Image (tube, grey):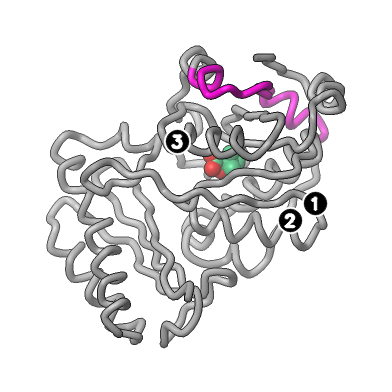
Amino acid sequence: MNVITTVAEMIAQREHLPRPLGLVPTMGYLHEGHMTLARWARRDNRSVVASIFVNPTQFGPSEDFASYPRDMERDLQVLQAEGVDVVFAPTVEEMYPQGFSTYVNVERVTEVLEGARRPGHFRGVATVVAKLFTIVRPDRSYFGQKDGQQVAVVKRLVQDLNLGTEVVVVPTVREPDGLALSSRNVYLTPQERRAAPVLYRALSRVRDLYLAGERSAERLRQEAAGMINAEPLAKLDYISIADAATLEELAVVDRPTMVSLAARFGRARLIDNVVIGQG
Ligand code: PAF
């Protein structure tokens, strides 16, 4: 496995990598969710590039950029074991050299949910993802459904700027009790960790009610909110029932729909989602 830290080397390497080429963009501190992305990429492509870059532009000033968990040595072992060919792990200065002043702003789909609560977050995500696509030129790129709004933003970005990569969405990997894997789960105390699966229980309840015929978004939202508000350690931020592509809130569930939520458990802010109404 080749570890590359400069943009120039990555551009030179990509010309020699057999096609199709799959890209797995990550911020490191890899868990089973990332490993699943790498496995899917390995299965579908002749070459696999994984990037490890904790992207400062997608963190707000009061967010956890400095303390975001990092473990490069272990990450490289994990990626090697998954058969990744090249790891692109640039420094912040390499990605954002002095004078950097171009940012990508995806409108509308970034203005709700996480985007409304984390100003600038998706501007940072869209900018770094556009840079990674330009540097690596992947035929396919792999993103987890866990970050459901990010998926909608990246799909819009690729379509609008004709970036020519197929966005492959990989299902969320969960602990046996339903908690979605996330690098930020390390912030949970043991008590909060025991309480956190209430999020997936609430999402599963919404899906069951939908499958039983409920189509009122308001009734589905209320059901999920009731379950989460009954958990003393959870502080619910939002529950959204929205068009899966545009993220516009729905009154009636009559199309592919993302049911998403965010809640705080002490220091950890967790997000999760399920997609319903896919036909
Ligand atoms: O999902 C992530 O880990 C990040 O948002 C991404 C896509 C690697 C961009 O920094």
Q: How far separated are the C-alphas under marks 3 and 1? A: 32 Å
Examine the image and state in which quarter residue 217 appears.
bottom left
- What secondary structure is found at the residue carrying circle 2? helix
Beta carbon at label 3 within 8 Å of ligand 1 = no
Task: Please state the horizontal and vertical placement of residue 166, each as a whole percent of the image.
Answer: 70, 51
Which residue is more in the foreground, 178 or 189? 178
Q: Amino acid at mark 2?
A: Val
Check if mark 3's residue and mark 2's residue have beta carbons within 8 Å: no
Does residue 219 sit above or below 223 in this rendering? below
Residue that numbered label 2 is attached to? 158
Check if mark 1's residue and mark 2's residue have beta carbons within 8 Å: yes
Does residue 240 sit above or below 235 in this rendering? below
On residue 64, the disc is 3
From this viewpoint, is residue 76 visible?
yes
Q: Which residues are magenta?
A: 78-100
Does residue 236 sit above or below 270 in this rendering? below
Q: Is residue 41 left or right of residue 75?
A: right
Q: Is residue 243 left or right of residue 211?
A: right
Task: Please state the horizontal and vertical placement of residue 208, each as a whole percent of the image.
Answer: 26, 71
Q: Quadrant of ligand 1?
A: top right
- What secondary structure is found at the residue carrying circle 1? loop
Residue that numbered label 1 is attached to? 164
Q: Residue at x 44, y 75 (%)?
A: 277
